Image (tube, rainbow, N blue to C red):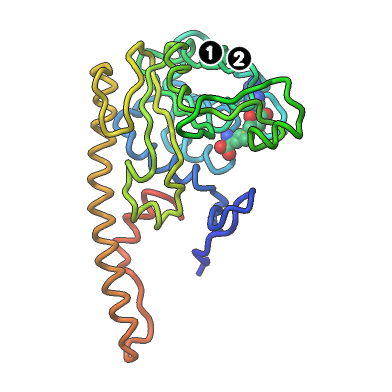
Amino acid sequence: MVSRRFRPGPDGRLEATCPRCGSLERHRFLSLLLGALAPDLLDLDTVVEIAPSPQSTPLLDRLHPRQRISLDLGHDKRAVDALASLTALPLRDASVDLLVCYHVLEHVPDDCSAMREISRVLSPRGIALIEVPIKGGVLTDEDPSATPDERARRFGQSDHVRWYGDDFDDRLLAAGLSSARVTPPTLVGDAAVEWFRLMAHEVVWVARHGTAAATPAVPGGSGLSAAFDAVLADLARTQDRLVRARERADRLAAQRDALRTQPAVPQVRPRADVLTRLRRVVHL
Ligand SMILES: C[S@@+](CC[C@H](N)C(=O)[O-])C[C@H]1O[C@@H](n2cnc3c(N)ncnc32)[C@H](O)[C@@H]1O
């Protein structure tokens, strides 16, 4: 049996890496988020992934788009369909139904151009899932001319040109993207955050065309288009389903702990049907 003991992450974060598939916290949360958005991700034409990872690409393939295109500038030598910059995407206007861009914008000196490109290529029904490192309570700190040492100190890595702050949503809006933030505890609850070893403070921006003011974290969504409100409603419904699954898992864990104190029972495992349901959500 494969151990479920999670390994440290690239920067030494404890319990970050899945021992089986190598996913990090953000990849596992992406899997849950795509599950939540599934009703809006049917019959997809073009899905684009910027800077793909071996853990996220299979999640997008499961959506069965007619075509999936991966792009990267080439710094990390990752396998992609084409080398291209996010600031000049080789894609037609309004041609992309889903675009995933995780941990790229903080590397891009002209991030406003990159955001406008995302807005340009999204189809009318298109959704972008965007993640960047962010600090709350401060504005973005950026300096493309900072030396590598200074970048590492100020922005967390020598190849980052900024550390985003509270104005990130406004930057998206200025590029024509209306967005809602979603975090793991908001979507799946604290017990699932613990079970899937997610990062509670991780933020994903679910963005699409729009000029509405920046929105509160999901659930919510006042001021958004009806279509976007429907996406948020789906997220809330999925959260309810996951909360119920979590409550069942908690009950089973309590039963298991109780049984552990009885020496006559040699081995106790959570119920297979509950685990099967959970594993359908994330491939642990
Ligand atoms: C931290 S890695 C991405 C990690 C990956 N998306 C994940 O979630 O595991 C950053 C990537 O951004 C790419 N990159 C940097 N600037 C870019 C640009 N202007 N256009 C496209 N990709 C860029 C780098 O080449 C690198 O592969």
The front one of 230 and 143 is 143
Whether residue 81 is visible here, answered yes or no, is no
The amino acid at mark 1 is: Glu
Q: Is residue 253 left or right of residue 157?
A: left
Q: Position of residue 245 (x, y in %)?
A: 26, 54
Which residue is painted at 44% across and 36% down in the image? Answer: 203
Where on the image, by quarter, is ligand 1?
A: top right
Which residue is painted at 59% across and 14% down in the image? Answer: 89
The front one of 196 and 214 is 214
> For the residues marked 2 and 1, what is the alpha-carbon distance in whole angstroms?
6 Å
List the residue tagged with mark 1. Answer: 117
Q: Earlier in the sequence, mark 2 or mark 1?
A: 2
Q: Looking at this rendering, what residue extends furthest in the front direction?
A: 137
Q: Where is residue 129 in the image (x, y as percent from the top left)?
A: 45, 28
Q: Is residue 81 left or right of residue 231?
A: right
| Image quadrant where residue 261 sits | bottom left
Disc 1: CA contacts within 10 A as few (<14), some (14-19) or many (>=20): many
List the residue tagged with mark 2. Answer: 87
- Marks 2/1 in contact by CB < 8 Å: the verdict is yes
Whether residue 221 is visible here, answered yes or no, is yes
Which residue is painted at 60% across and 30% down in the image? Answer: 51
The amino acid at mark 2 is: Thr
The front one of 207 and 157 is 157
Q: Position of residue 229 (x, y in %)?
A: 25, 24
Number of numbered discs: 2
| Image quadrant where residue 270 sits | bottom left
Note whether ligand 1 is within 8 Å of mark 2: yes
Above or below residue 59? Residue 261 is below
Secondary structure at badge 1 equals helix
Q: Where is residue 195 in the image (x, y as percent from the top left)?
A: 40, 57
